[in-house]
Image (cartoon, grey):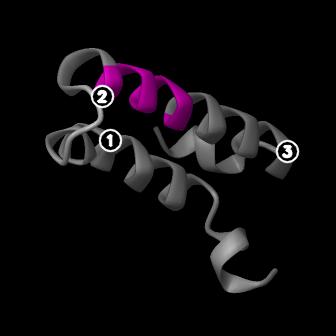
Amino acid sequence: MKHIFHLPAHVRLLLGTLALAAGLLLSWALCGTDGLGLLVLLPFAVFFIRLNTELWHGE
């Protein structure tokens, strides 16, 4: 898992975006658009944020 953090920024952004989109589709498929879907989406959002830390630090 540590090797993924050494990939170029655009590759990490692509992987994070794909994971976030997959989580969104999964939450819609399992829970619809209610609040429980946000709980399903949360791990994917955390993965995206953790993978693309330079977006939040202004680097």
Q: Residue at x 33, y 24 (%)?
A: 28
Secondary structure beneath dot 2 equals: helix
Q: Magenta segment, principal secondary structure?
A: helix
Q: Quadrant of residue 34?
A: top left
Relative to residue 22, is residue 34 depicted above or below?
A: below
Whether residue 25 appears in magenta in the rendering, the answer is yes
Mark 1 or mark 3, which has the lower sequence index? Answer: 3
Q: Amino acid at mark 3?
A: His
Left or right of 10: which side holds 37? left
Mark 3 sits on what residue? 10
Relative to residue 53, is residue 28 depicted above or below?
A: above
Could you tell me residue 2's position as x and y percent?
Answer: 51, 45
Left or right of 14: which side holds 22? left
Whether residue 46 appears in magenta in the rendering, the answer is no
Q: Are dots 2 and 1 in contact, CB under 8 Å? A: yes
Mark 2 or mark 3, which has the lower sequence index? Answer: 3
Mark 2 sits on what residue? 27
